[in-house]
Image: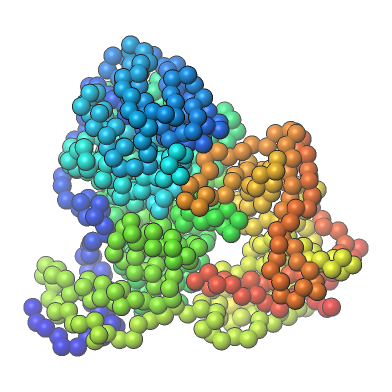
Amino acid sequence: MRRKTRTGLSRIIAIIMALLCAGLALTGCSRAAAEAFAGSAPVSNAGGTWAIYWYLCGSDLESNGGFATTDLEEMTSVDLPDNVQVVVQTGGANEWQNNFADAETASRFLYSANGFERVDEQPAANMGDTDTLADFLDFCLKNYPADNQAVILWNHGGGSLSGVAFDELYDGDSLSLTELRDAFSAVSEPSLENPPFELVGFDACLMATIDTAATLSGFARYMVASEETEPGCGWKYDGFLQALADNPGMDGAQLGAAICDTYVEGCAEIGQEDEITLSVVSVERSAPLLAAYYNVGLESLLASCINPEFFSALGRGAQAAENYGGNTRDQGYTNMVDLGDFVRNTAEELPLNSRSVLDTLESCVVYKVAGPYRAQSSGLSCYYPYDMDEESYNQFTQAYGDGPYAYLYEYVVTGQLSSEGAEYLYAMAYQDVPDVETPAAPQVEQMDELPTVPTLNSLDLEDFPVTVDGDGYAVLNLGAETASVLSGVYFELAYMDEENDLILLLGRDNDLDMDWDNGVFKDNFRGVWGTIDGALAYMEITYEGDDYNLYSVPILLNGKECSLRVCYDYGEEAWKILGARRGLEENGMSDKNLIQLKPGDEITTLHYMLTISGGGEEPKQVPVDTITVTADTSFAEEDMGDGKFVMLFEMVDARNNSMYSDVVNITVEGGEIQVGGE
């Protein structure tokens, strides 16, 4: 290998791009992912005996709602055969809604053909701790081994960043994915050929992530998990356990499919099937997916170095993709996006590896179900920094170490490629690749100037004037250069009450005519807005698709802050209230219980308000209208009537910075809409 005395960053990018074009997998994702790249195909243990190890962290789901007790009752309604048994550990709740589990102990129970019995009792321990899970698994493997062993983790979930099993007794501490792998490692040796567990399932929100699949590499043959939040009912234990009792010869994929199918049935029984997801993932087949995912990350990092405006296209792809658990200012940010939808949206910018990700993803997800308003679910999600928050980004890197995504997202969150990111690219370019001659790595100080992310601020623009065209529509003409740094354009609408010196904000939408190539955006104001039983609502769009749009509407539901989940279905040309959900907790825990409205409930609409004379004050959230829910309560788009309104175009750049256009005054009088003027 020859040594080159000086090489710039552009030369490094060219070398790596050439290697990617040659189809070489430049791997190195993470500790867990790296272990997935070796080994032969596993051999299924279908048939024989089954043991399910159920790690039941009750938390507020049990203490407030009794959901764990309900699932235990479902389990014990099934008559198990001699070759199927379930071992349960209870913990993590302030109170249990039954007479056999309690908050003072970590109790262990066996359910088998002989019935339900307590088999062990330990002092209460943190269910969000590695040692607690490891001790339970060790107890199960020593005392209740089987030909087919499955683990179910029951609780809240928080996706790749926050993990699973939030213990109510220990300040909501949870098992991170690193802690989860450490627990499995403490009791079993990983083996792709013969993993110790036929299936690992998460009856919890948001856990069907590519990072979770990587975490289970060598420990599970199949994974069952949901990309989206789950309803409080969770899995239907009498459904899939009955299927296993009827056919103990099934393998993990068949059991996973039974879990999915009966989950749909259970959610439909309570009218909460619209937004559900659940998938069965072949962990062994995730190895080539992880390689392709790694390479598309590297391709993204290279594309962002060649042209930092790439981040704007990446952001638009993420905003247009199905994402889970919120990702709005009111609901909080899980930063989880559907992997397949995200990659499809950015395939034009990432032509070298996108197809490989989509093909291996389809092979990896062997079965999945999704509600009608989660139609783009591919079965696995991945991290994207919607919030552009350094703290959550640091949480991501602490969990998954270095690699292309660590440097890619550090680059966009901080605004500049770091010297460590440049060093990483040098290392990737000058690694030993068989049959490819590359120069030895130079020192990092020999690099080109580090690239930065272009933002609206960097364009040094003073204002964003709005004109009115000949048809009476407001037009924001940014030009192609400005549009190239944007990840989204929206409009914000407000009602202006001059008599009372008030501006009532109505929300944010993207119902605009958009010409991204030329940077021209035109309003589509029609004098209508979303209402709950006729009361104007503040609403923010969370997803725009070809078949449906999803919105978040902040409310007080019986005095408690929630977000109403609302859908507009293009096929039915109708609005639908899906339910209400509390926002994310500070520890990243997602609320599992989608609350269904019932007659007698009180909804108070929440808006943001400021004064006309305030001079730049921050909007304050205020309650406006209170509605008593009836059997006919509905969400609809209704005529707002005469009045004065103001609209602003909101421009969002790749780093989630917002700037606003000049104010557009809109007057509605006698049903006639006049845009512009004073």
What residue do we see at 51% from left, 78% from top? Answer: 455
Give the position of the N terminus as an image quadrant. Answer: bottom left
Residue 558 coordinates in the image, percent (x, y): 70, 40
* Residue at the (22%, 65%) spot, across then down: 26
Q: Is residue 240 above or below residue 375?
A: above
Task: Find residue 314 and report its horizontal and vertical position in percent.
Answer: 45, 67
Q: How is the image coloured?
A: rainbow
Choose between 118 and 241: the one closer to the eye.
118
Q: Is any part of residue 363 visible from this angle?
A: no
Task: Report the residue that reaches farthest toward the left.
Answer: 1
For residue 77, side relative to residue 55 (left or right): right
The vertical placement of 211 against 446, above or below, is above
Residue 374 in the image: above or below residue 115: below
Q: Quadrant of residue 509?
A: bottom right
Quadrant location of the C terminus in the rendered image: bottom right
Figure check: 326 above or below 416: above
Q: At 73% across and 70% down in the image, what residue appears?
A: 647
Camera-side residue of 595 and 13: 595
The answer to whether residue 554 shows anywhere in this view is yes
Left or right of 662? Residue 37 is left
- Toward the top, the furthest residue is 114
- Occupied quadrant, residue 668: bottom right
